[in-house]
Image: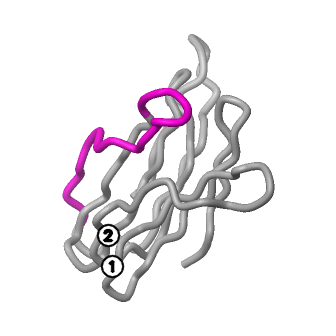
Amino acid sequence: HGVNHISHGGRDYLAIPNYYGGDTAIYRWEGHRFGELQRIKTDGAGSLEVFKQGKDQMLGIAEFNVGVAAIYVLKGAYPNERFALWQKVSAPGVGSMATFEIELDNGGRQLLLI
């Protein structure tokens, strides 16, 4: 369980999961400190994965207690940006997530491991 840094559109964010029954907190750099931007309702958020899907900024949250990998996309423009639910994937026992790219003859492909 750790803190993830997100850099998008010239702005910096921190995403902080809470495995023990709290929300995942998203903070945005305000020039002199990080201020809370949003709380995402999670249950057993054990791991976060930050990645890009095309131009979209994505955030994956492994929710162990409910067996779900939740994927969010950053929507909106500063100062009203928020992570919105993009997809939930059933994943009983999920403890972490990771992304990687594979080089293919016809172009690269990004994969999400749950």
Quadrant (top left, top right, bottom left, bottom right) of the C terminus: bottom left
Q: Say if 15 sits above or below 74 in the image.
A: below
Q: Categorize mark 1 by other alpha carbons within 10 Å: few (<14), some (14-19), many (20+).
A: many
Q: Position of residue 28 (x, y in %)?
A: 62, 52
Q: Residue furthest bottom?
A: 20
Earlier sequence position, callout 2 versus callout 1: 1
> Does the stretch in magenta take in 81?
yes
Q: Position of residue 103 (x, y in %)?
A: 64, 27
Instruction: Give the camera-side residue of 70 and 37.
Output: 37
SS assignment at label 2: strand
In the image, what residue occupies the spot 29% across and 38% down?
Answer: 86
Tell me the magenta residue range. Answer: 75-91
Q: Which mark is residue 63?
A: 2
Q: Say if 106 sits above or below 18 in the image.
A: above
Q: Which residue is mark 1?
A: 44
Q: Residue furthest right?
A: 32
In the image, what residue occupies the spot 51% across and 27% down?
Answer: 77
Q: Position of residue 84 (x, y in %)?
A: 33, 41
Q: Which mark is residue 36?
A: none
Quadrant (top left, top right, bottom left, bottom right) of the N terminus: bottom right
Please state which amino acid type lies under the numbered disc 1. Gly
Instruction: Give the camera-side residue of 98 and 19.
Output: 19
Q: Say if 40 sits above or below 45 in the image.
A: above
Quarter of the view holding residue 10: top right
Please, which colouring scheme is shown?
Answer: one colour
Q: Are marks 2 and 1 in contact (CB under 8 Å)?
A: yes
Q: CA distance from mark 2 to mark 1?
A: 5 Å
Tally the marks.
Answer: 2
> Does the stretch in magenta take in 32?
no
Instruction: Give the camera-side residue of 6 and 101.
Output: 6
Image position of 84 (left or right of 38): left
